[in-house]
Image (cartoon, grey):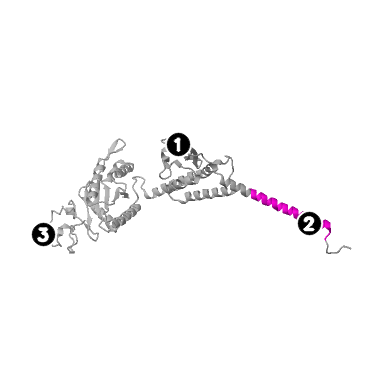
């Protein structure tokens, strides 16, 4: 008689066969997995140059490429100016593409831009001045071609990975360049006067503030000029406001040719301009003002068969060491300009400041006298009757204000 706890032999056979099948399945899965790992390692260890041209990247390689592309695109769209976009492309593109040299040539906003890595000789290759072989990719934004992206293939062929990456990032490079150029043009429009090319009044004051801070650190002086066209209303009344605009445009070009790149040209209002000359002495500021007057007088503005000629008056002042009061500085330049107007226009007048920044200069009766150290008011009485700490009162009191004695170490003559 069979016991209840015993298992029939057929059942044991079935259980044994099932266990063997399960073990065989597990072994097969392990073998398949091992072969997959070995294949992935083999693909990773084989250089890309040795792989077939149509070989597809592994999953790990595809993820790595995607992350690199996304990081590059994010960096392009994170910057705020055209120059920053160019720097990002020049710095990251060659490494991203795995190429020795990579360059971008784009024509945006009517200007051609060439982007190459710093210190690379790619510029010569772009213009055919260097023997090299290039593979190029079009840059399109908004359905229009805006440039070309190229890589050097002289020393090594273009790998499939390079082709995939460059095709993926080319549209983003084009769009980033277009967007950055648009931002720069909007920024320029907000700070530049489109008629004369000078900066706006608000931006000019900000630049003056910056230059005064820089001058205080370096111990230099800043020249401030106020220029105004003489009898400009007559031009508008006689020839029309369009003719006046043509004169202002010519004046802007004349000032740009006369001044340094570091000088600030600001349209103060109407036909009046504020000019800021960093690191300038009084003699240099006067020379610049006289050059401007001569060149403005030489301007010939053609208008509907006639030639319009104008003159200008210029007021000059100089910042004192450590001076930061912009309003007082501009007020002195404006005061000097009004003196030039009172003296017959077409001339330069100078008003300096004392140790407190208060203006020092001739009264209306003696406005023609420039307050240089070697020029004194000839209309005054005997100058020796005025007391002073080693200097005569007339050396620096041009406005008839009570003289305040200072220590003997102070300079009585304005610097």
Residue 119, above or below 365: above
Please report the residue visible at 58 percent of the width from the left and 45 percent of the height from the top: 43
Label 2 environment density (alpha carbons within 10 Å; few <14, some 14–19, many ≥20): few
Residue 178, image x, y percentages: 46, 45
Q: In this view, does 79 lie above or below 247?
A: below
Q: Is 90 on the left or on the right of 243, as rendered?
A: right
Q: Which range of residues does the magenta coloring cover?
A: 7-35
> What residue sits right under mark 2 in the picture?
15
Q: How far is disc 3 from disc 2 in space, using C-alphas?
A: 131 Å
Callout 3: helix, strand or loop? helix
Is residue 109 something that shows in the picture?
no
Residue under the point 62% across and 48% down:
38
Label 3 neighbour load within 10 Å: few <14, some 14-19, many 20+:
few
Q: In the image, residue 155 lies at what x, y percent?
A: 48, 39
Evaluate if marks 1 and 2 touch, with contact meaning CB atoms under 8 Å apart.
no
Q: How far apart are marks 1 and 2 (CA)?
A: 73 Å
Residue 11 at least partly seen: yes
Percent of width and height locating residue 255 = 29, 45
Asked if residue 19 is among those painted magenta in the image, a careful observer would answer yes
Q: Mark 3 points at which residue?
A: 384
| Residue 358 figure quarter | bottom left
Residue matched to label 1: 132
Q: Are marks 3 and 1 in contact (CB under 8 Å)?
A: no
Q: Distance between the residues labelled 3 and 1?
A: 82 Å
> Does label 3 or label 2 sit earlier along the sequence?
2
**Nearer to me, 147 or 193:** 147
């Amino acid at each position: 008689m069979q016991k209840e706890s015993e298992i029939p032999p057929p059942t044991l056979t079935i259980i044994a066969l099932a266990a063997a099948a399960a073990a065989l399945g597990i072994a097969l899965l392990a073998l398949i997995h091992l072969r997959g790992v070995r294949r992935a390692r083999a693909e990773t260890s084989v250089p890309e140059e040795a792989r077939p041209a149509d070989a597809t990247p592994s999953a790990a390689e595809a993820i790595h490429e995607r992350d690199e592309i996304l990081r590059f695109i994010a960096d392009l769209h994170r910057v705020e100016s055209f120059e920053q976009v160019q720097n990002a492309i020049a710095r990251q593109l060659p490494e991203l593409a795995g190429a020795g040299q990579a360059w971008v040539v784009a024509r945006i906003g009517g200007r051609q831009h060439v982007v190459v890595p710093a210190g690379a000789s790619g510029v010569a290759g772009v213009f055919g001045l260097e023997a090299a072989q290039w593979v190029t990719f079009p840059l399109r934004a908004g359905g229009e071609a805006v440039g070309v992206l190229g890589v050097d293939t002289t020393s090594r062929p273009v790998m499939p990975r390079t082709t995939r990456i460059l095709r993926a990032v080319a549209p983003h490079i084009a769009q980033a360049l277009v967007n950055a150029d648009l931002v720069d043009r909007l920024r320029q429009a907000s700070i530049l006067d489109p008629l004369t090319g000078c900066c706006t009044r608000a931006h000019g004051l900000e630049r003056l503030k910056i230059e005064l801070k820089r001058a205080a650190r370096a111990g230099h002086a800043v020249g401030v000029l106020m220029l105004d066209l003489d009898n400009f209303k007559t031009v508008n009344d006689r020839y029309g406001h369009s003719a006046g605009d043509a004169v202002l445009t010519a004046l802007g070009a004349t000032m740009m040719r006369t001044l340094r790149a570091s000088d600030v040209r600001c349209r103060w209002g109407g036909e009046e301009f504020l000019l800021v000359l960093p690191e300038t002495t009084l003699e240099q500021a006067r020379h610049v003002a006289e050059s401007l007057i001569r060149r403005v007088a030489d301007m010939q503005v053609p208008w509907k068969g006639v030639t319009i000629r104008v003159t200008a008056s210029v007021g000059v002042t100089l910042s004192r060491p450590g001076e930061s009061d912009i309003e007082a500085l501009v007020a002195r330049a404006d005061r000097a300009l009004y003196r030039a107007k009172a003296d017959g226009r077409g001339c330069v007048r100078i008003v300096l400041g004392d140790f407190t920044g208060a203006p020092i200069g001739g009264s209306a009766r003696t406005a023609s006298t420039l307050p240089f150290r070697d020029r004194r008011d000839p209309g005054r009485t005997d100058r020796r009757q005025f007391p002073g700490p080693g200097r005569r009162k007339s050396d620096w009191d041009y406005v008839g204000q009570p003289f305040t004695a200072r220590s003997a170490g102070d300079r009585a003559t304005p610097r």
